[in-house]
Amino acid sequence: MIKREKAEDFLYMEARLIDLRNFCDWLELFTKDGIYWLPINENSKPNDHLSLIYDDDLRRRERVRRLALSPPSQAPFSRTLHVVSNVEVVAGNDDHDVVLHSVQMVYEIRGGDDRQFELGDARIFAARAEHRLRLHDTNWKIVLKRMVLLNRHIPIPNLTFII
Amino acid sequence: MTTLIEQLGLNLEPNECIKETKNDFRVNGQVYTNQLLFQLEMDRIFGQTWIFVGHDSEIPEIGDFKTSYIGRRPVIVTRGHDNQIYVMLNRCRHRGSVLCRDAKGNAKSFQCIYHGWVYDLNGDLLGISKHKGGYPDDIDKSGLGLMAVPQVCNYRGLIFVCMDPNADSFLNYLGEAKSFLDIHLDRSPIGKINCKYGAHRTEYLGNWKFQSENAVDGYHGDTVHESFFKLIDEFGNKSGQHGAYTQGDFKEIIEHRTTGRSMGFKNGHGIWESPMTEGAILAMKNGPHAEYVKELEKLRGEKLAHQMLNSMNLMIFPNLAVAHGQLRVIRPISVDKTEVSIHFYDLEQVPENYNEFRMSGYQRFFGPAAFGSPDDVEIFSINQTGLQAEEVEWLILSRGLQREKLDNQGVRTGDPTDETPQRAFHRAWKHFMTNGS
């Protein structure tokens, strides 16, 4: 098991990597078979219902690469701030496997000429997060990061940043 | 009697909004920004043409319902006790409340939460609460059911409705575009699709017509989707093949985008089509989905089967695009706000791994967090922002006008990057907005 303090440190570190746009290091937090998943219907399997995001290693690398290519939906790019709270450590299978639950509030805002449509609006994404971690040598790595957004059923204009 | 245009106080008549000469085609910016024109559209476009409201696989069981919209009119789509599809205005006949506040579900009847009037699945008024003494005992309930949408057509599972009881039938309205809708549906060996995966929903701060135009626009890809092409170039199609871009590298994709065609039909429908290369067909025939290709060739004949593997986007005027294995539904909210919901569908009776392969490719490009469609949506908001500079007045939609071919069925064909489908859309827009005058 992992102490809650350690679990919090891990989640804070992940949030900081995203918010500081250190995406290459963020990618390295995942195991090779790790999944980054934002379901729409949280009770369905990823093959039975569309997901907002269902990234394996390759798709995740594509996602990070695309941000560097400045596509229209990320030019100007999104800045984010993650607030991580309500952290709970749920027993895993053994000492090398643990499940963390947390609540995350993600603030997102784009810059540029902020009076233009879609720019300058601060958006809040609230989510219940689940992290499944596995111990690799002395480092915890993400096997599954699953974020269940509160607004997953309603229209979302732009979710092309890392959340 | 004053006309609706006079009542609205429009200073720009719809017939002045589209300007066409032999070599020029222009659309007035107010078509996308004017509140009064938007109001007129809700009456003349969404009140007179065939509107897509859902697919019957979304309501498979008796008592299943979903809500939808005809422009801004809220409607309920139900499967009645007789297994028929009913589409009714979602408005209690008593004092106007919506009857149904859930997006979907299963019900035995619908009860108004205001005063408790109860309606059957087909809209019949079943009961008035505290009837006795309040209304005549023999009040004629038969005239007080939910207002039925005058025309409903279930075409191979796609439910289209029309508010105009005198409008031409759906198949006449669809006209020459029908065979292109059939191509999409006939990709299933039994000709059936199933919208069982839910939907990706997005919205943008721009006019609804931007999405209708763009669904069949072959001109924007090189710029708007450049990042996607670069991903294919660097990572290949291993993480999911998006049907429109089966080629391996950036140069091939750009070259391939100039092959194919665009078409515009009467009543505003249009297509953009990009055929698979011989190499891509060969790869499909020898790849993990060989079994599916073989069966399709057997059922439909080689030529049609290969056309079915093509990337072909169909826009059915005014609010449905059928493309890349999806039903894309466009819902105007206001003159500068639009919802788009994308229903990726299952092809029935194909090998399971083929639907999984399709879904993986779909999710690489489509959805609010994907690598393609969010860039389109961004453009629609960019357009709306730019149009606030009203003095420029006209948008230019003349690309390829001089090389467009017109056949005796009224079908126009252009190059794949031409604005042929968009012009067809706006000709129909003008036709319906002026009541055909």
Image: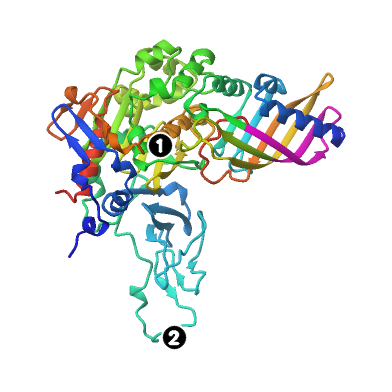
Marks counted in the figure total: 2
The alpha-carbon separation of the residues under discs 1 and 2 comes to 54 Å
Q: Is residue A10 visible?
A: yes
Q: Mark 2 points at which residue?
A: B134
Q: Can residue A46 be seen in this view?
A: no
Residue B188 is left or right of residue A110, and the answer is left
Q: Which of the two marks, 1 or 2, is nearer to us in this view?
A: 1
Q: Mark 1 points at which residue?
A: B385
What residue sits 56% from the left and 23% below the top? A67
Q: Quadrant of the N terminus of chain B?
A: bottom left
Q: In which quarter of the image is residue B210?
A: top left
What residue sits 41% from the left and 85% below the top? B135
Tell me the chief SS of the magenta region: strand
Hey, which residue is sitting farthest front in the picture? Answer: B391
| Placement of B297 over or under A7, stated as above or below | above
What residue sits 72% from the left and 28% below the top? A16
| Placement of B3 over or under B402, stated as above or below | below
> Is residue B275 shown in magenta?
no
Hey, which residue is sitting farthest bottom in the picture? Answer: B133
Magenta residues span A80-104
Q: Position of residue B227 (x, y in %)?
A: 48, 20
Q: In which quarter of the image is residue B429?
A: top left
Q: Position of residue B334 (x, y in %)?
A: 39, 49
